Image (cartoon, rainbow, N blue to C red):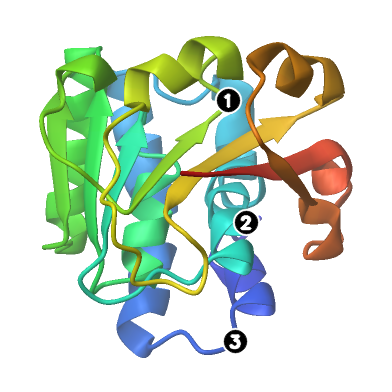
Amino acid sequence: MEISSALIQKYFKDLTADQIAQFDQLFELYSFWNSQINVISRKDIEELYERHILHSLGIAKFCTFKPGEKVLDVGTGGGFPGIPLAILFPETTFHLVDSIGKKIKVVTEVAAALGLNNVKASHLRAEQVPDKYDFVVSRAVTRLIDFYPWVKGKFNKDSKNAIPNGILYLKGGELAEEISESRLKAELYPLSEYFEEEFFATKYVVYIPQ
């Protein structure tokens, strides 16, 4: 079974040769690091391109990050969604944080191997991050009612993007109750509108403008 970035190229037609090479490297890099430090479930590693990389890039189908924008990835784990987004948007700065140090080691090593100069990785809780950002991204770290207080107040006031600054949160399943509980003004964008694979049937980008 050949595992490559063909699935990514199916949905992102304008990748440069360098970007394709970087996406192609991800399977080997994550297979190696996952055998040292478990950041992806063992059964999922064969589905890396669909369930982790393409899922992360669902954010890019909704929002095109601009050169010079700053994006915070909270609870990045092994680097999702931050690493795939950093490959796609090389002129945008990404700060990937996680409270588990060994996961940040994986992120640092993967970013270095890919030559991603636009990625900074920090062993921090979101509440400890002192800077301000245009967008905060995350992938199903916790319920929105718990997540929002971690990042409230971390947004730049001025927006450079067609989409106002805010949170772009990847979540799956039935979300009405969770959004209602959070009392946040959230918009749901189904990934099934962009990707035809069955995995995305119940997956969403949740956008919360600030």
* Foreground tag (3 vs 1): 1
The residue at the point 20 percent across, 71 percent down is 68
The residue at the point 34 percent across, 38 percent down is 73
The residue indicated by pointer 1 is 140
Whole-angstrom CA distance, mark 3 to mark 1, is 27 Å
Whole-angstrom CA distance, mark 3 to mark 2, is 14 Å
Q: Nearer the viewer, residue 102 or 149?
A: 149
Q: Earlier in the sequence, mark 1 or mark 2?
A: 2
Q: Which mark is residue 58?
A: 2
Q: Nearer the viewer, residue 48 or 97?
A: 97
Q: Which mark is residue 13?
A: 3
Q: Is residue 141 visible?
A: yes
* Residue type (three-letter) at the residue carrying disc 3: Lys
The residue at the point 66 percent across, 35 percent down is 185
Residue 89 higher or lower than 97, as above or below: below
* Residue type (three-letter) at the residue carrying disc 1: Ala
| Residue 143 horizontal side relative to residue 76, left or right | right
* Residue type (three-letter) at the residue carrying disc 2: Gly
The quadrant of the picture occupied by the N terminus is: bottom right
Q: Nearer the viewer, residue 73 or 15?
A: 73
Say what secondary structure mark 1 lies in.
loop
Q: Is residue 75 visible?
A: no
Residue at the extreme front = 157
Q: In which quarter of the view is residue 195 placed?
A: bottom right
Say what secondary structure mark 2 lies in.
helix
Residue 87 higher or lower than 112, as above or below: below
* Foreground tag (3 vs 2): 2
- Percent position (x, y) of residue 177? 83, 15
Whole-angstrom CA distance, mark 1 to mark 2, is 13 Å
- Percent position (x, y) of residue 3? 57, 58
